[in-house]
Image (cartoon, rainbow, N blue to C red):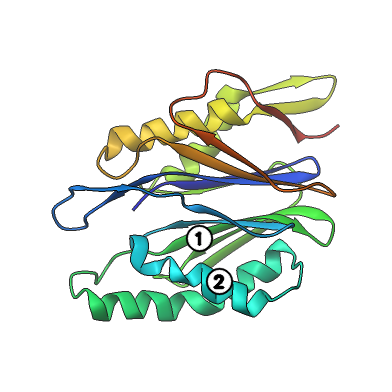
Amino acid sequence: MTVIFGVTYDNGAMVGADQQRHHGITLASGGKAKKTVVMTTKAVVAKAGIGPDADYIFDEARKLIGDRDLDAADVADIFEQLAPAVLERARKVHGHLPTTPLHFIVSGITKGEPSIHALQTEIQERTDATGAGQVMALGVRKETNSRAGELVYTAAWKDSGVISLDLNKWAADLMEEEHAAKSYSVDYPMDFALVRLGQAVEERHYPNRPTEAFSVQFIPK
C-alpha cells in the first residue's frame, strides 16, 4: 500500500504519491517506483496497491483511450471498468492477497472544470467531485482522507477573499503522517502531476521534503 492524494484548485488539479514499495508478507522494501501517470492532457492518475502486478492497467487504459484527449471523468470510467479484473488476477496469482486494496485517484479537467475522482476497487466505491477546493486521499490509515482535509487548514491562508494552498507543505505533511504510521509502506521520493486548463501537464519530483513553497489558488474569490 502507499499514499495517493489529489486536490482541485482554480483552473487546475493535481495528483500525487510517494514512491515506496514493499513486500506484502515480509514487509521488506520492494524498492521505489513512480505511481503517478499522465493519461491525457486533462487527466492524471495515481495508483495504490498490489505494486508492479497491477501496473499493466495503465497500458490497458491507454488502449481504450487511443488518441482521444479524454476528460478526467472519462478516464476514471475506464479505470473503474478495468480495475476489478486486475484485482482478481492478482488474487489468483498471489493467494495471500484476499484483502489487498487497489485504489486510484484521477485528477484533471472535466467539461472545462477541475475534477477529482477516487476509486476503491475492493469495496466497489467511487467518489467524484467537481470545482476548486476539493481534496481526496487514500493511504495506510482509515483516517487518511479526513486528515488530508484537516491538513488544508495548516497549509492554506486567505487574502482578499482568495484562499491559497501551499501544495508542497500540504502533501509533505500528509505523506509524513502516513510514513509515521507505516514507515515500510510510505516514504520519499514524492511525485506530483498537475493539470491546468489549456496548459501542458506538469510533473514534479521531490527526493526529500520540499523546502520551497508551491502555492495555488485553492478557492478563488
In the picture, measured across the screen, residue 180 lies left or right of residue 74, that is left
* Quadrant in the picture for residue 130: bottom right
In the picture, measured across the screen, residue 22 lies left or right of residue 4, that is left
Mark 2 to mark 1 CA distance (whole Å) = 8 Å
Residue receiving disc 1: 104
Three-letter amino acid code at the position of disc 2: Phe
Which mark identifies residue 198?
Answer: none
- Please tell me which residue is depicted at 61% across the width and 31% down the height of the picture: 167
Label 1's element?
Answer: strand
Query: Measured along the vertical axis of the image, is residue 129 above or below residue 79?
Result: above
- Residue 121 in the image, given as x and y percentages of width and height: 44, 70
- Looking at the picture, tell me which residue is in the foreground, 149 or 51: 51
Sort mark 2 into few (<14), some (14-19) or many (20+) by Cα contacts within 10 Å.
many
Three-letter amino acid code at the position of disc 1: Phe
Query: Measured along the vertical axis of the image, is residue 53 above or below residue 15?
Result: below
Query: Measured along the vertical axis of the image, is residue 168 above or below residue 130?
Result: above
- Please tell me which residue is depicted at 51% across the width and 24% down the height of the picture: 210
Query: Measured along the vertical axis of the image, is residue 201 above or below residue 86?
Result: above
Residue receiving disc 2: 79
- Residue 124 in the image, given as x and y percentages of width and height: 46, 73
* Quadrant in the picture for residue 92: bottom left
In the picture, measured across the screen, residue 34 lies left or right of residue 184, that is right
- Residue 199 in the image, given as x and y percentages of width and height: 81, 46
- Residue 192 in the image, given as x and y percentages of width and height: 57, 41
- Please tell me which residue is depicted at 86% across the width and 32% down the height of the picture: 221
Sort mark 1 into few (<14), some (14-19) or many (20+) by Cα contacts within 10 Å.
many
Asked if the residues shown at circle 2 and circle 1 are in contact, with their CB atoms under 8 angstroms apart, the answer is yes
Label 2's element?
Answer: helix
Q: Earlier in the sequence, mark 2 or mark 1?
A: 2
